[in-house]
Amino acid sequence: MIRLVLTRLSGFVLTLFAASVVLFVTINVLPGSAAKSALGIHATAQAIQRFEAQHGLDRPLLVQYAEWLGRILQGDFGTSFQNGVAVGPELLKRLPVTLELATFAFIIANLIAIPLGAWAARRHQKGADRSITFLATILGAIPNFWLATLLVLVFTLTLRWLPPGGFTPFTVNPVMNLKQMIMPALSLGIVSSALLIRIMRASMLEVLSTDYVRTAEAKGANSRTIVFRHSMRNAFIPYLNVAAVEFGFLFGSVVVIEDIFLLPGVGSFVLVGIINRDYPVLLAGALAITLFVLTLNLLVDLIASLLDPRQVKARNS
């Protein structure tokens, strides 16, 4: 088990390092000028040179990366080119909003995907299976921003049940918080459930075709026992890995949804950075999302290894 953890941690560190290199290079080679975005299109050449020298943008890319990485390792994410605000504290202030949204959406996605995927597998090649598979295909084709617009049209403009946007912390007003978060969470969760339905169905079909499930059926075990006692645990192993990736995708795909619903999260922060070519904001936001996704994948990988009957048997032997 210790060897497994060390191996996974080594891979985590190497992947994070490689991702930081790719992020830094990609953001710095994008067309446009951070200096012109910060100073305005009428900035003089001298002002642009001073700005680039002040922020180290005139140095070789390798030197810029080394200096940036050194600051990151010390917990310094830099300051915004636009307003001089420290990026690290601002990111930490916005992180709970994005985490709440992604978690809420993830719960919705799983509440839809797990029962529908399991039921489709149990009713393989029958009407229920075909209907659920068709539903998953439709949901997967819907852009989340389109669904968000539709929800606002129905629940805000027509029925007037929910506010159009904004954010109130749960600790301040739980009811208002839920009212403000339900539509953005549904926008993300419903669309994300499409992939998870297919994964749950495929995982359950694989497990239901194994010898021990067939043996349980031959012994007269009822459908509920077969699904919940013999199938679900093993089906969750591949499902968890994909679900973790999907949760990371949710965390990284909140940019447009946060902007639509005026949520002060990491996504809207990064969006402003993209518009303004604000390198410190872009790098900090992208790195935070990458770190979150990699950490989540590491934890799920370790949990899946613990749940895998083959590895459990190997450790006990």
Image (cartoon, rainbow, N blue to C red):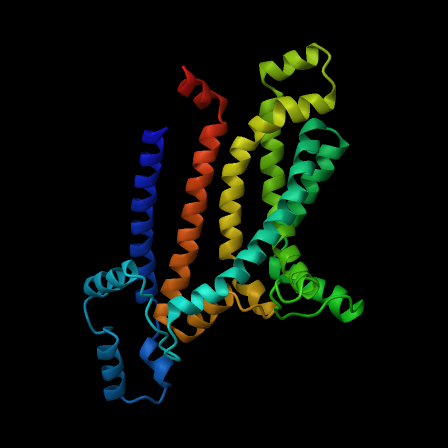
Q: Check the image and report above or below for 2 versus 78.
A: above
- Whether residue 124 is visible, yes or no, is no
Residue placed farthest to the top in the image?
A: 219
Q: Position of residue 259 (x, y in %)?
A: 56, 69
- Whether residue 184 is visible, yes or no, is yes
Residue sitting at x 64%, y 11%: 215
Q: Position of residue 38 (x, y in %)?
A: 36, 81
In this rendered view, identify the residue nearer to me: 71 or 133. 71
In this rendered view, identify the residue nearer to me: 233 or 186. 233
In this rendered view, identify the residue nearer to me: 135 or 173. 173
Residue sitting at x 34%, y 73%: 79
Name which quarter of the figure residue 23 lies in: bottom left
From the viewer's perspective, is 218 left or right of 251?
right
| Quarter the C terminus occupies | top left
Name which quarter of the figure residue 69 lies in: bottom left
Residue sitting at x 69%, y 37%: 115
From the viewer's perspective, is 271 left or right of 7?
right
